[in-house]
């Protein structure tokens, strides 16, 4: 069993795994192959002790994973788009190779014109979920010496200045959408209904109930899109592979199939805790003039996130207690929406990502683990072609 708790995040046709010292990403290329990359996490702000203090550390981790998660979310969509572009030009191999991975034409269909829109819609959820799954991970400074893998080069094909703008734009969009949809809209709706009668606890409670309803409704609505549904399947594959590692089983598809798509350490719990803490926090704020009510909802977001992170840490340390498991059960319930049963091909991608994270951390892959053909991701982003493309994956 791993001595460190690995966590991750679903991407577009892939999985990001976050370890102690590095993260790894594996993606299913439209041609059916698996591509991967790693990136260091033990540089930059992580070395500063002050940023590991309670409450402050949660904000640092949240900021880091929002940036890193969004960056890789954009990159995973970019790889799909570039590959499809090549296929349209007749220079790529977009057809299913008949290998049984199911990642050829079906993978391309899932990465069609709706991918960019649905990536935008998914960003506030996936980034926040990833922020809480890698509990011990710190800030990654991609500009620090040795802080990025070859795959993160800004000069790579399709990843120049426009890419940086895309990441910044999506991050800004995610924050605006998240705050507007999950904090301000419930306030306005509660003000227009219960607020006409009461500004007391009934108002705060109704605002919280509306916030929960919007959150669940949002997940169910975006989950109806085919490519979002596939992303939720990759989320399930990520959890199943982590279950397998934590149980001490070899990392194989058959072993992973024994485990559920839900995981008790999923960052979905972070979002659920945020919803609950926000009700209590805004109840303390109480009645304010309309403008200050809006300001309070925006200003208190980082405070609520920091407190929620510490509560999540506390719950993780005492998960063996039945009462704690019961209190955290809503996070498992919500995962019935944010995770789906993956295909074998998706589990393969999650396993490759987890294996690469283990290797980057200097840890051994469990004996008997599967070896899947894969190649470094930079060969698909304009970097040097890997002569070993299609060769077996990491060896234990």
Image: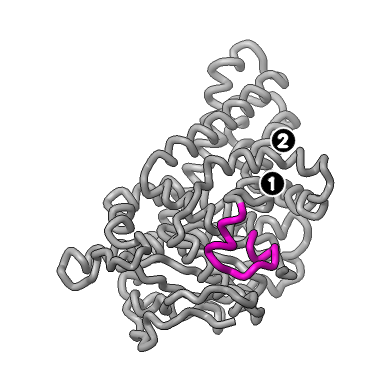
Residue at position x 53%, y 67% in the image: 351
Judged left or right of residue 146, residue 35 is left
Q: Nearer the viewer, residue 212 or 7?
A: 7
Q: Specify whether residue 244 is painted magenta.
A: yes
- Counting from the top left corner in percent of width and height, residue 86 is at 22, 68
How many marks do you count on the picture?
Answer: 2
Q: Which residues are magenta?
A: 243-259
Q: Is residue 231 above or below residue 3?
A: above
- Counting from the top left corner in percent of width and height, residue 267 is at 62, 51
Residue 303 bears which disc, if any?
1
Q: Which residue is mark 2?
A: 281
Circles 1, 2 touching at the beta carbon (< 8 Å)? yes
Judged left or right of residue 318, residue 96 is left
Q: Is residue 65 above or below residue 276?
A: below
Disc 1, SS = helix
- Counting from the top left corner in percent of width and height, residue 111 is at 32, 55
């Amino acid at each position: 069993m791993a001595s460190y708790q690995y966590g991750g995040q679903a991407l577009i046709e892939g999985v990001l795994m976050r370890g102690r010292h590095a993260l790894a990403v594996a993606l299913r290329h439209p041609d059916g192959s698996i591509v991967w990359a790693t990136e260091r996490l033990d540089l930059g702000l992580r070395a500063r002790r002050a940023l590991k203090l309670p409450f402050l550390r949660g904000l640092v981790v949240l900021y880091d994973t929002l940036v890193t998660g969004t960056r890789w979310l954009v990159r995973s969509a970019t790889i799909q788009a570039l590959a499809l572009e090549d296929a349209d030009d007749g220079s790529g191999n977009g057809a299913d190779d008949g290998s049984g991975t199911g990642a050829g034409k079906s993978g391309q269909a899932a990465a069609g014109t709706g991918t960019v829109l649905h990536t935008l819609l998914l960003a506030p959820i996936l980034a926040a979920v990833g922020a809480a799954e890698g509990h011990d991970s710190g800030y990654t400074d991609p500009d620090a010496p040795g802080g990025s893998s070859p795959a993160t080069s800004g000069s790579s094909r399709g990843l120049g200045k426009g890419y940086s703008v895309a990441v910044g734009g999506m991050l800004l969009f995610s924050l605006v959408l998240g705050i507007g949809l999950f904090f301000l809209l419930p306030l306005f709706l509660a003000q227009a209904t219960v607020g006409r009668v009461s500004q007391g606890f009934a108002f705060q409670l109704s605002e919280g109930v509306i916030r929960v309803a919007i959150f669940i409704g949002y997940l169910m609505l975006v989950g109806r899109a085919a490519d979002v549904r596939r992303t939720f399947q990759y989320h399930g594959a990520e959890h199943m592979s982590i279950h397998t590692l934590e149980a001490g089983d070899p990392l194989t598809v058959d072993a992973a199939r024994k485990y559920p798509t839900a995981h008790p350490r999923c960052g979905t719990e972070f979002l659920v805790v945020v919803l609950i803490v926000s009700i209590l926090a805004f109840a303390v704020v109480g009645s304010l003039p309309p403008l200050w009510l809006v300001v309070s909802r925006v200003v208190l977001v980082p405070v609520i996130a920091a407190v929620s992170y510490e509560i999540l840490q506390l719950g993780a340390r005492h998960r063996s207690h039945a009462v704690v498991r019961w209190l955290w059960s809503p996070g498992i319930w919500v995962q019935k929406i944010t995770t789906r049963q993956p295909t074998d091909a998706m589990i393969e991608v999650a396993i490759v990502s987890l294996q690469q994270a283990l290797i980057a951390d200097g840890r051994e892959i469990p004996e008997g683990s599967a070896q899947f053909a894969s190649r470094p991701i930079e060969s698909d982003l304009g970097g040097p072609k890997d002569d070993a493309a299609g060769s077996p994956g990491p060896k234990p």
